Image (cartoon, rainbow, N blue to C red):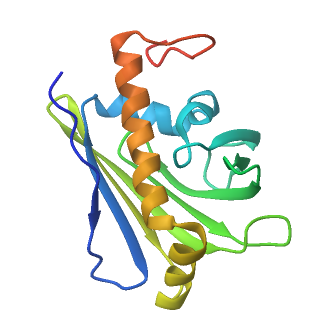
Amino acid sequence: MAARSKVELVAAEDARAIIVTRIIDAPRELVFEAWTSPDHLARWWGPKGFTTTTKTFNMSPGGIWRFVMHGPDGRDYENRITYDEIDRPKRLAYHVRGVMDVEPVEFNTTVTFEEMGGKTRLTMRALFPTAAARDRVVKEYGAEEGGQQTISRLADYVARQLRGERGKGAPDLEG
């Protein structure tokens, strides 16, 4: 395998956006599968030190993924993603809306998976209602750094899967 690429935080043309890109040394189908299966998501989703517990998962347009991100400080972050578009293995679009039982954030995310000769250019674009809403999430939740760390964890997870380092209870991406 080639040397791992670095995560790139793209300077957004829109002050409401956070855009993270990375070239992942794995085929697009495998990266997409890791992003769309609750078993895989539990093994990499979230910044360093976080774990994720899925409560419900329905990956279909209008379907919901409810999950808890457990922070290294012991705090739990309730989340709910609603899927808007699923174009396997090219694109996902979903939205997050803060309601009483989840974190008070709102944004729309589009994730694209571009095939690059056995590698995948992943671009995650989160768009907030206002620049102030984006800035609040960056300040209060560390969203820029968290997004970079999350994508790095995905790349590391997929690389381990490709090397056959599935470990105890780890699902097989190829099967």
Residue depicted at 76% across the width and 49% down the height: 74
Residue 49 vs 135, above or below: the answer is above
Query: In screen coordinates, is 52 left or right of 146?
Result: right
In front here: 56 or 50?
A: 50
Q: Position of residue 148 (x, y in %)?
A: 39, 54
Q: Position of residue 21 (x, y in %)?
A: 29, 55
Residue 137 lies in what quarter of the image?
Answer: bottom right
Query: In screen coordinates, is 112 left or right of 60?
Result: left
Residue 50 vs 96, above or below: the answer is above
Residue 15 lies in what quarter of the image?
Answer: bottom left
Residue depicted at 50% across the width and 83% down the height: 135
Q: Position of residue 82 (x, y in %)?
A: 65, 58
The image shows a total of numbered marks equal to 0
Residue depicted at 34% across the width and 59% down the height: 20
Q: Position of residue 1 (x, y in %)?
A: 18, 21
Residue depicted at 41% across the width and 18% down the height: 161
Residue 33 vs 136, above or below: the answer is above
In front here: 64 or 163?
A: 163
